[in-house]
């Protein structure tokens, strides 16, 4: 079976889904290929034990780490990709993140575009993803030409009190930009199961709800679910993709198109190109395919006041960037602090199964819970490869850890000064990869990058990549809004070069 389209997009997450949305109405025949199906709306969506203990929605597959040990990655194969379960934090990257930035652990390289090239696309993405934000609170906020489409999500009283306590320390806490449907008459009910959970109300601004479903309202846009892209095949010249081999429900066939877009996420996009080359990876004249894998330095921090209950339901509304570019007595960037969704006892039990549940409930009711995030610097030896049996192997060793430890210490000191005598931390490993990026970096130099500044492969005329694999650096903020902005920029490029 052979099927023909103008554009084939492989993957429906923040990259592929937003690109399809940006192309709707152009007249181009677009096919979205998604290896998963729609995530069901069901009671288990909001069951912390089902989600965190039994991993109900995680992909049922394992990868290998650098030592050859198997791990189950934080990957979700559904329409909308990982955005179905993300925390909907949608900040812009700082303007400085696009320039070369010196860290204690090395240099974060410059991008081939700067912040001004993405500013208008950020604004468009914020409208599509219904971002609620206040740009006047954070001193590191980059310039913008217009206000966010919706006012920031208000703090609940407990979080508002915490914000005041931090401000009295001379810090600048701000409302975390969030993509939820909290408009007048919107679907959001401000529940406690947003961050890490799927939304039963379809009120989270994920790529499925915000982009894929609106795109499918156009007759020229199709979606093929439960379809695995096996490999891309070039024509006889080797300079163009002719088709993609697809497996679906036991059937194998090829789909042809004029342009192909890979949007599978940093690991799976690299894996697809690695599977597709006749002698090595496809589009790999630079030797960079799969290299420079990054995923942030991530630590969960739980601060406990044993004498005070945390009454918050929707906790994830506060962030701190005072340490983003430097510390008080430290000249190098440290990173971002942001509240996570309110931790519940079964979620703690997933990480600490031997601790009595009674004690975990005591902690969860009295804790405030943070995500501590520092930049992971590109390293060509941190890479994605395939074994002889085509199993994905992620060779990753963390770097920039001195800055990350300083950020953890600063966060702990901040919380103790705010009245929380007990602080517990856990630094994440290779399996916590929700911010993966960097394996197919874009750039001006074909010898040092896989893609050009419009995300087209240097070696292949009709092959594009639109996801976080194109990032030359990881910054220290959530990548989803930047992925969406990049997708809209590529959509405009397609319109101008049709």
Image (cartoon, rainbow, N blue to C red):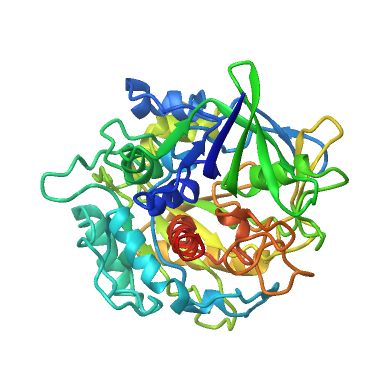
* In-front residue for pair 146/293: 146
Q: Indicate left or right for 290 with 337 as reference.
A: right
Q: Give the residue at x 26% y 40%.
A: 203
Q: Residue furthest top?
A: 250
* In-front residue for pair 39/430: 39
147 versus 39 height, above or below: below
312 versus 333 height, above or below: above
Residue 361 lies in quadrant: top left
Q: Indicate left or right for 330 with 346 as reference.
A: right
Q: Indicate left or right for 459 with 223 as reference.
A: right
* In-front residue for pair 339/194: 194
Q: Position of residue 281 (x, y in %)?
A: 80, 48
Q: Position of residue 291 (x, y in %)?
A: 75, 57
366 versus 166 height, above or below: above
Q: Position of residue 453 (x, y in %)?
A: 60, 69
Residue 492 lies in quadrant: bottom left
Q: Indicate left or right for 47 with 16 as reference.
A: left
* In-front residue for pair 426/147: 147
Q: Give the residue at x 72% y 66%.
A: 449
Q: Is residue 369 visible?
A: no
Q: Position of residue 446 (x, y in %)?
A: 75, 69
């Amino acid at each position: 079976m052979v099927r023909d389209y103008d554009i084939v997009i492989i993957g429906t997450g923040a990259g592929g889904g937003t690109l399809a949305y940006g192309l709707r109405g152009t007249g181009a025949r677009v096919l979205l290929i998604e290896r998963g199906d729609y995530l069901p709306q069901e009671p288990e969506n909001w069951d912390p034990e089902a989600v965190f203990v039994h991993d109900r929605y995680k992909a049922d597959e394992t990868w290998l780490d650098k030592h050859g040990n198997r791990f189950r990655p934080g990957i979700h194969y559904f329409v909308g990709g990982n955005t179905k379960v993300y925390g909907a934090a949608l900040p812009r990257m700082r303007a400085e993140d696009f320039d070369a930035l010196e860290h204690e652990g090395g240099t974060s390289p410059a991008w081939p575009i700067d912040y001004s090239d993405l500013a208008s696309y950020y604004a468009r993405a914020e409208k599509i993803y219904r971002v609620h934000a206040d740009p006047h609170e954070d001193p590191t906020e980059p310039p913008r030409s217009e206000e966010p489409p919706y006012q920031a999500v208000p703090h609940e009283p407990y979080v508002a009190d915490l914000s005041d306590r931090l401000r009295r320390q001379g810090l600048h806490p701000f409302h975390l930009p969030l993509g939820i449907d909290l408009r007048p008459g919107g679907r959001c009910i401000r529940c406690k199961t947003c961050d890490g959970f799927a939304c039963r109300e379809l009120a989270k601004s994920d790529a499925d709800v915000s982009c894929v479903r609106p795109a499918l309202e156009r007759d020229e846009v199709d979606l093929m679910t439960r379809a695995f892209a096996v490999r891309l095949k070039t024509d006889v010249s080797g300079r163009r993709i002719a088709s993609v081999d697809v497996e679906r429900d036991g059937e194998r066939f090829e789909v042809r198109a004029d342009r192909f877009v890979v949007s599978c996420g940093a690991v799976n996009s690299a894996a697809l190109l690695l599977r597709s080359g006749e002698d090595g990876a496809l589009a790999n004249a630079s030797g960079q395919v799969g290299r420079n894998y990054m995923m942030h330095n991530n630590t969960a921090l739980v601060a406990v006041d044993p004498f005070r209950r945390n009454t918050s339901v929707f906790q994830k509304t506060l962030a701190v960037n005072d340490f983003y570019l430097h510390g008080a007595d430290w000249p190098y960037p440290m990173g971002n602090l942001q509240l996570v969704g309110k931790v519940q006892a079964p979620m703690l039990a997933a990480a600490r199964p031997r601790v009595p549940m009674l004690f975990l409930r005591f902690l969860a009711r009295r804790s405030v819970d943070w995500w501590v995030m520092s930049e992971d610097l590109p390293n060509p030896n941190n890479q994605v490869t395939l074994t002889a049996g085509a199993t994905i192997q992620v060779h990753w060793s963390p770097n920039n850890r001195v800055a990350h430890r300083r950020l953890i210490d600063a966060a702990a000191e901040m919380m103790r000064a705010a009245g929380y005598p007990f602080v517990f931390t856990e630094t994440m490993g290779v399996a916590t990869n929700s911010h993966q990026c960097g394996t197919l970096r874009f750039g001006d130099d074909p010898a040092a990058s896989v893609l050009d500044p419009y995300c087209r492969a240097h070696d292949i005329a009709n092959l594009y990549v639109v996801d976080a694999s194109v990032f030359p650096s990881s910054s220290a903020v959530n990548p989803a809004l930047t992925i969406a902005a990049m997708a809209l920029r590529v959509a405009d490029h397609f319109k101008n070069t049709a």
